Image (spheres, helix red, strand yellow):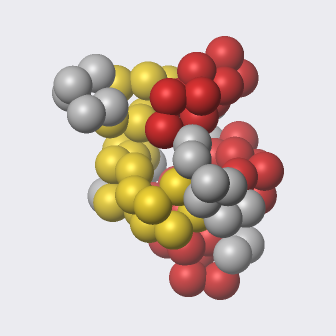
Amino acid sequence: MKVTNITDIDAFFKAVDDCKGKVELVTGEGDRLNLKSKLSQYVSMANIFSNGEIPELEIIAYEKEDTDRLIGFMINGE
């Protein structure tokens, strides 16, 4: 799924941390980073973070409830 305009990075990673299954970020090169890993979170944000906002990310969540949680975050900021 594509997620866009993330302005609250801490809330986004809280939503990711609350997920039960694996959540991955797909890089522009096609690599997949485990977003549940704090190291991967820092590395990925260092590479794509600009101006306090993340314009678009491709995220893969393997559990339906995790997909729903991330969609809820994008819609409601929760």
Q: Position of residue 44 (x, y in %)?
A: 53, 29
Quarter of the image holding residue 67?
A: bottom left
Question: Given the current orientation, which residue lies at the most extreme front position?
Answer: 51
Q: Note whether 26 is above or below 78 in the view shown.
A: above
Q: Residue at x 66, y 16 (%)?
A: 39
Q: Note whether 50 is above or below 31 in the view shown.
A: below
Q: Residue at x 56, y 82 (%)?
A: 75
Quarter of the image holding residue 70?
A: bottom right
Question: Given the current orientation, which residue lies at the most extreme left position?
Answer: 30
Q: Residue at x 25, y 33 (%)?
A: 28
The quarter of the rendered structure image containing the C terminus is bottom right
Q: Note whether 16 is above or below 23 in the view shown.
A: below
Evaluate whether residue 68 shows in this view. Answer: no
The quarter of the rendered structure image containing the N terminus is bottom left
Q: Residue at x 34, y 25 (%)?
A: 32
Q: Position of residue 56 (x, y in %)?
A: 40, 58
- Report whether 57 appears left or right of 15: left
- Report whether 8 appears left or right of 55: right
